[in-house]
Image: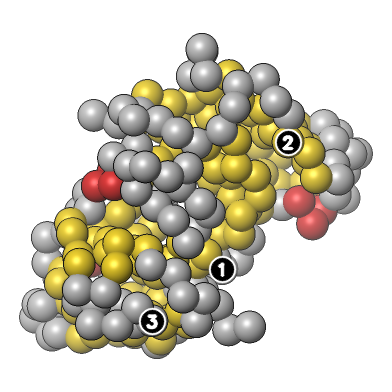
């Protein structure tokens, strides 16, 4: 059975800290891994990773995929209170099991 | 751009009642799906559709029906509501999903918070 595990489940930091969120996966027919940010409502797309070792970057956020060790990390540098959200990792496999992790709740304190 | 529109935003049902959650997208996406989100369990796939006239079950389909008569609309029907169906429901669409694609990102609606008493 396909599985996506995120860690930690929750994280509390202060503004300016750097955080690393983890996502490991065991997915048949793996082709891509996606990160989303969920504030109060709908998840919104951050990154899609298809190739191992190539970093995707957007401002203070970056992500990388390791297809050999079956994991991805999402880094956020110089965190701000606006980064507070649930971060979701998705590793689609077979269509019936488009698999999300349970998410990491990030709280950034001023 | 409207994107993915879900209605209603909130709904309270009594056990045994039925209702339909509406979902429409204006991006001409072939792929649409319904998820439920419960605390600590992430997003779980209920049903999905890869195009008009085609639907299939996801991880947790029991108690729900779907249909896809047009590319734009993908309603979710609760046949006989149960307290276990209390959850937040999200509809999502994507340009390309399937065994021969890279699985393009999902675009989500704003969700429906359903309470069954």
The chain identifier of the residue carrying mark 2 reads A
Q: What element carries label 3?
A: loop
Q: Tag 1 or tag 2, which sits nearer the N-term?
A: 1
Quadrant hosting residue B111? bottom left
Quick check: marks 2 and 3 in contact, CB under 8 Å? no
Identify the secondary structure beneath mark 1: loop
Q: Distance between the residues labelled 1 and 3?
A: 22 Å
**Crowd class of label 1 (few under 14; some 14 to 19; many from 20; radius 10 Å):** some
Residue furthest top as drawn: A68
Residue topped by disc 2: A56
Q: Tell me if B75 is positioned left or right of A72 in this view.
A: left
Q: On the rendered structure, is B106 left or right of A47?
A: left
Who is closer to the viewer here, A82 or B115?
A82
Horizontal and vertical percent position of residue A82: 79, 57
Q: Do labels 2 and 1 share a chain?
A: yes
Q: Residue A41 carries which label?
A: 1
Crowding at dot 2, Cα within 10 Å, few <14 / some 14-19 / many 20+, comes out as: some
Q: Residue at x 42, y 45 (%)?
A: B101
């Amino acid at each position: 059975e396909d599985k996506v595990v995120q860690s930690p489940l929750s994280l509390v930091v202060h503004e300016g800290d750097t955080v690393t969120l983890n996502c490991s996966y065991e997915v048949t027919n793996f082709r891509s891994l996606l990160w989303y940010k969920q504030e109060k409502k709908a998840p919104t797309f951050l990154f899609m990773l298809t190739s191992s070792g190539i970093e995707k970057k957007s401002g203070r956020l970056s992500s990388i995929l390791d297809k050999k060790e079956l994991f991805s990390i999402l880094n956020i540098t110089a965190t701000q209170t606006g980064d507070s959200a649930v971060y979701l990792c998705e590793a689609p496999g077979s269509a019936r099991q488009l698999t999300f992790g349970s998410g990491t709740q990030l709280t950034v304190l001023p | 751009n409207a994107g993915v529109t879900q209605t209603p935003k909130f709904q309270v049902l009594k056990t045994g009642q039925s209702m339909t959650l509406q979902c429409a997208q204006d991006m001409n996406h072939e792929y649409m799906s319904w998820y439920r989100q419960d605390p600590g369990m992430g997003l779980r796939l209920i049903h999905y559709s890869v195009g008009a006239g085609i639907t299939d079950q996801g991880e947790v389909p029991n108690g729900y029906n779907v249909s896809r008569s047009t590319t734009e609309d993908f309603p979710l029907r609760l046949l006989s509501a149960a307290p276990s169906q209390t959850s937040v429901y999200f509809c999502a669409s994507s340009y390309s999903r399937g065994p021969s694609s890279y699985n393009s990102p999902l675009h989500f609606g704003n969700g429906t918070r359903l309470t069954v008493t």
